[in-house]
Amino acid sequence: MLNATPSQRHKILSLTLVFLLTGLLGCSHGSQGEQAAGATAKAAPSAGGAPPAGGAGSAPAGGAGAAPAGGASSAPAGAAPAASQAPAGAGSASPAAGGITAPAGTTAAKPAEPPLAPEKIPAVVAKVNGTPIAKTELIKMADQIHAQLAPNQPETAEFYRKVLDQLVSNELLLEEAKASGITASDEEVNKQVSELKGRFPSPEKYQEELKKEGLTEADLAKQAREAFVLQKLVETKVVNDVKVSDQQVKAFYDQNPDKLKRPERVHVRHILIHVDAKATAEDKKKARAKADDILAKVKAGGDFAKLAEESSDDPGSKQRGGDLSWVSRNQTVPPFESAAFGLKKPNDVSPVVETQFGYHVIQLIEHQDAGLVPFDEVKEKIAGFLKQQQQREKFLDHVKALKDKAKVEIYI
């Protein structure tokens, strides 16, 4: 499925690892800043029979991953600043494993470092205030990062040291949480693990993925508990007093017009009559006749939304009356785009449009020209973005202070 999330790809990623990679909040839910700096900076995903252009490998007609109309992911590109567009010094919204990937702009080429053979790694790779970090823990985390996030990154000594640095940070935060009396309940842990299990098509697939990742259910429960503890610590003790003023939000808007532009876009809905790629000529003829009949009903004054709910083969949009939310150019296959952007006035309806997914009837709800997004539409997203940046900076400063005070011994 295009734009598939990790849960849709049925992968298990260590909950503690997720926490470390995001740098702060979001181990069990996306923070407001993540939504602003991530999802809303992407073009709206295709829904059902309107997949991105060149959609090789695209979802079948009616892809289930379509975002609800008006949802966060339907915001226009440019409606909120992306992490890479942050003000100078603001930092990245989602660092990649503590710098495991090379920083942007790196030009000096270093001699290639050979991979570090696991047998050359000592049984204890570090001690944090006397608490050992085992080689097995480092290898497991490094393998997860390597397999899922940095497949082309050689497992060199430097790679392992950067993973270890994250584990050291993790241990220091857990020590602080323990000293503060912060815990996670069995109910919270079981809920998180149950939700993860529910993302898999069957218990067998879940167990298969656990085995592939080298995890047991006990490992997963332990990581879930640590993730909740870390989240509570950060939310209540570290970034709880971060606030963003209205003046800061307006200043960012005024100073970054290039980051807050949106392309020409149309808000449309459609009715899809699906045709299988292997359909016979007779089947295609019947589908076309059905689409023609629906178009005739719309032109005779029929309720488009009701007809979509009754007849559309796009499960991703039919329950919303065929609403695909906002669509920009180059997001859909060419015939769909041409018809959608050819509509001029609200409620205009296209002729029947044929794509590789079948036959569509498209209705225009609203058209917007390219331009700067109005301040009122993005002020909350900007506030969330700026807040996340400030939280991250405070979080990283907090971790540095913990390291400065701790006794950390590194053995690789």
Image: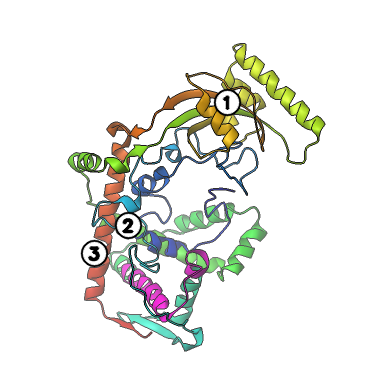
Q: Secondary structure at mark 3?
A: helix
Kindly identify which residue carries mark 1: 362
What span is colored magenta in the figure? Answer: 145-173
Q: Secondary structure at mark 2?
A: loop
Q: Secondary structure at mark 1?
A: strand
Regarding residue 225, the answer to whether it shows in the image is no
Q: Earlier in the sequence, mark 1 or mark 3?
A: 1
Residue 284 vertical placement versus 202 (above, below): above
In the image, residue 247 lies at what x, y percent? 18, 40
In the image, residue 44 lies at what x, y percent? 47, 39
In the image, residue 293 lies at what x, y percent? 70, 19
Q: Amino acid at mark 3?
A: Asp
Q: Earlier in the sequence, mark 2 or mark 3?
A: 2
Q: Amino acid at mark 1?
A: Ile
Mark 2 Cα within 10 Å, few/some/many (few <14, many 20+)?
A: many
Q: Earlier in the sequence, mark 2 or mark 1?
A: 2
Identity of the residue furthest to the top in this view: 300
Q: Amino acid at mark 2?
A: Ser
Find residue 92 and name its label.
Answer: 2
